[in-house]
Amino acid sequence: MFLEFIYPLVKYFTPFNVFLYLTFRGAYAALTTLLICFMFGSRIIEALRLLKIGQAVREDGPESHLAKSGTPTMGGVFIIISVLISMLLWGDLASQMIWITLGSFVAFGAIGFIDDYLKVSRHNSAGLPAWAKLAGQFAVAIAVVLILYFTGGDDITALYIPFLKNPAIDMGVLWIPFGVLLIVGESNAVNFSDGLDGLLAGLLILVFITLAILTYITGRTDYAAYLGIPYIQGAGELTVFCLAAAGACIGFLWFNAHPAEVFMGDVGSLSLGGLVAVISLIIKKEILILVIGGVFVLEIASVIIQVTSYKLRKKRVFKMAPLHHHFELSGWAETKVVIRFWILGGLFAIIALSTLKIQ
């Protein structure tokens, strides 16, 4: 919005040129989401408490979590609201990529909202049936991937592998099911990682900062050519989105740090997970996102291994899945698990960025 209003005034007042810089708008988009969370977070939490929108804790989980029952949930709502406001102010509303990512962000948030609402209204941890939740995720993912497939450039179906400068293969029409599975898988992987105070918010801050760097260099012809990565016209605008999301996660973490005053809920985890996957598809980092979000991969892999092992062998590999609960039951304090997973997330981000130079 600011860009549309101020751009025509640049010829009269040249300092307004600063609004044309992605770094300036990205920084203030992050600051906007952060301030919105700080200013209204406590009020929203109090409103959730008055409405009795409290978390129902799994009875088969760690006993230490039973004390968290009733803690306000669906805090992801103010992440979504703050990002929407920030993007309307600082984003380029003429950018198709912005509207695609905003649409998927809100759509996945809506699925999470329904799931959270059913959990709260029924006063248990069972929300949407698994088939209904997956059906909604697949529907949104198919719509997004088809839009990208038919409106993207010639390289939209090319698959790039870390350490390789040129695309490994042109997937053609097979890119559609691949992209759908990536979006659904990533959104669920992020969702599984939301189980400890501050864990997911901290990891997502690292992921979105990394994606902000990648979207910025992908949207610049000079940097993309120098690093040997695909140049995607207009991708730089997603830098503003990534930094807005990072700022919102930082603001949310202020209230979600141990002991948490509010939980993110599926409305937050599904929307942010879907957002991560959609951005990775747009900037052709479908494989690299698995490295950037390496902790998410480990979390969902632990669930798959646990379920498969129990069905085939009637034995559990982990004390509990997802993986963070296994370490809790192994004697690690909750805060220790969270901080160590943050460190691991930081290492994955560094490894991912290092691949840009090693190819």
Image (cartoon, helix red, strand yellow):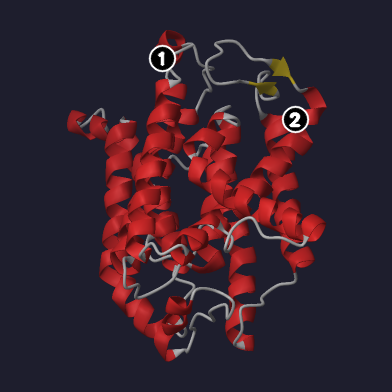
Numbered mark located on residue 175 in the image? 2
Q: Earlier in the sequence, mark 2 or mark 1?
A: 2
Residue 125 percent coordinates (x, y)? 61, 78
Residue 51 percent coordinates (x, y)? 47, 89
Q: In the image shown, does 55 or 61 lie closer to the viewer?
A: 61
Q: In the image shown, does 354 or 29 lie closer to the viewer?
A: 354
Is 55 on the left or on the right of 223, as rendered?
right
- Looking at the rendered structure, the secondary structure element under dot 1 is loop
- Looking at the rendered structure, the secondary structure element under dot 2 is helix
Compared to residue 282, the image places residue 171 above or below, namely: above
Q: Nearer the viewer, mark 2 or mark 1?
A: 1
Circle 1 residue: 357
The residue drawn where x is 35% and y is 83% is 46
Compared to residue 172, the image places residue 320 above or below, namely: below
Is 359 on the left or on the right of 153, as rendered?
left
Mark 2 to mark 1 CA distance (whole Å): 26 Å
Q: In the image shown, does 281 or 195 lie closer to the viewer?
A: 195
Compared to residue 315, the image places residue 59 above or below, namely: below
Numbered mark located on residue 23 in the image? none
Q: In the image shown, does 110 or 317 lie closer to the viewer?
A: 317
Looking at the image, can residue 186 be seen? yes
Residue type marked 2:
Trp
Mark 1 residue crowding within 10 angstroms, few (<14) / some (14–19) / many (20+): few
Residue 5 percent coordinates (x, y)? 35, 43
Looking at the image, can residue 89 be seen? no
Residue 103 percent coordinates (x, y)? 59, 51
Residue type marked 1:
Lys
Mark 2 residue crowding within 10 angstroms, few (<14) / some (14–19) / many (20+): some
The residue drawn where x is 55% and y is 46% is 298
The residue drawn where x is 61% and y is 58% is 108
Residue 35 sits in quarter: bottom left
The residue drawn where x is 34% and y is 76% is 261
